């Protein structure tokens, strides 16, 4: 979501642009049932954004994976009833490269251990439903995370020793580095759609708020971190992996990632945005 500032008396109004499908081909049902499409705001509408006096975490923020962050789906220890997806071998290979999700055998055959690792990965990145099926969404996310961990990809950010947030528009991932070490991420993001491309460049966080309230749609923008014009990081209120629902320039994150990022970076943290999102 992008918020563009317009002065109105003593407050600030933010114009919310209309949504359009920029990558309809990326809407993927094979991983499981897709959540219902969210309703986007009309072009003529405006959004009033106010800063909460006492920032507190939203009490019922939706998570892209379905339940709220406090009720994440559990990861089964057994894969006896776990379906095999058309991208089984690719996902196994990427998970072996990424590490941290449990032992996998790269053979294209589903096993209880493979299923547990895939479900754990799906749960971590809000892929719905997290049932261990290695479909197009799962392999896309796994590929992007694996590539973002390579030294060649990390070098594209050009970060120095200071704490820096890196946003890769091409892979639709982001991470935070300090002294060459990754201290957050990489994780998946969703940036501006066609007509609202997230601008590339070097910026810095200049305004933060745990909650931004938007009128008239009565929607919270959780963990808002503004880094250029009306564009910033915030938790998405829609299913992150629906590529057809692009942002209006902002960097959308999964709820828990937005929360962690809020505690990792701060005011004046450099933000480097590079690459190009396909279709924008």
Image: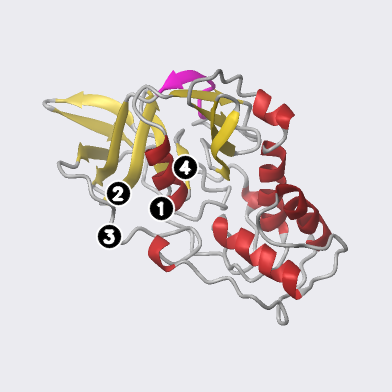
* CA gap, disc 3 and disc 1: 13 Å
Residue 129, percent from left and from top: 58, 68
Q: Which residue corresponds to mark 2?
A: 220
Asked if the residue at tag 1 contacts the one at tag 2, i.e. Cβ–Cβ closer than 8 Å, the answer is yes
Q: Which residue corresponds to mark 4?
A: 252
Residue 222 shows in the view: yes
Q: Is residue 153 above or below residue 52?
A: above
Q: Quadrant of the C terminus?
A: top right
Q: Secondary structure at mark 2?
A: strand
Residue 199 inside the magenta-drawn segment: yes
Question: Is 277 left or right of 257, judged from the image as shown?
Answer: right
* CA gap, disc 2 and disc 3: 11 Å
Residue 2, percent from left and from top: 40, 35
| Marking on residue 237 | 1
Q: Quadrant of residue 161?
A: top right
Q: Secondary structure at mark 1?
A: loop
Asked if the residue at tag 4 contacts the one at tag 1, i.e. Cβ–Cβ closer than 8 Å, the answer is no
Q: Nearer the viewer, mark 4 or mark 3?
A: 3
Asked if the residue at tag 3 contacts the one at tag 2, i.e. Cβ–Cβ closer than 8 Å, the answer is no
Q: Which residue corresponds to mark 3?
A: 59
Q: Nearer the viewer, residue 9 or 157?
A: 157
Residue 18 shows in the view: no
The 10 Å Cα crowd at callout 2, few under 14, some 14 to 19, many 20 or more, is many
* CA gap, disc 2 and disc 4: 13 Å
Q: Nearer the viewer, residue 81 or 274?
A: 81
Q: Secondary structure at mark 4?
A: strand
Asked if the residue at tag 3 contacts the one at tag 4, i.e. Cβ–Cβ closer than 8 Å, the answer is no
Segment colored magenta: 198-204
């Amino acid at each position: 979501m992008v918020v563009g500032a317009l002065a109105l008396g003593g407050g600030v109004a933010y114009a919310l642009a209309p949504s359009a499908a920029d990558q309809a081909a990326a809407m993927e049902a094979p991983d499981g049932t897709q959540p219902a499409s969210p309703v986007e705001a009309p072009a003529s509408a405006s959004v009033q954004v106010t800063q909460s006096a006492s920032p507190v975490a939203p009490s019922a923020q939706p998570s892209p994976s379905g339940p709220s962050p406090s009720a994440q789906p559990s990861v089964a220890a057994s894969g006896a009833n776990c379906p095999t997806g058309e991208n089984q071998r690719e996902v196994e290979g990427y998970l072996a490269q990424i590490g941290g999700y449990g032992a996998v055998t790269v053979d294209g055959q589903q096993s209880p251990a493979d299923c547990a690792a895939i479900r754990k990965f799906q749960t971590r990145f809000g892929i719905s439903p997290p049932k261990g099926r290695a479909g197009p969404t799962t392999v896309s996310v796994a590929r992007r995370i694996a590539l973002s961990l390579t030294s060649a990809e990390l070098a594209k950010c050009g970060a120095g020793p200071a704490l820096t947030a890196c946003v890769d528009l091409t892979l639709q991932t982001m991470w935070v580095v300090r002294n060459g070490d990754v201290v957050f991420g990489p994780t998946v993001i969703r940036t501006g759609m066609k007509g609202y491309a997230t601008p590339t460049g070097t910026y810095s966080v200049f305004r933060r708020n745990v909650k931004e309230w938007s009128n008239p749609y009565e929607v919270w923008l959780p963990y808002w971190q503004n880094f250029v014009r009306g564009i910033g990081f915030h938790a998405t209120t829609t299913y992150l992996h629906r590529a057809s629902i692009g942002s209006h320039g902002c960097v959308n994150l999964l709820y828990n990632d937005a929360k962690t990022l809020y505690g990792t970076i701060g005011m004046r943290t450099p933000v480097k945005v590079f690459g190009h999102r396909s279709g924008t």
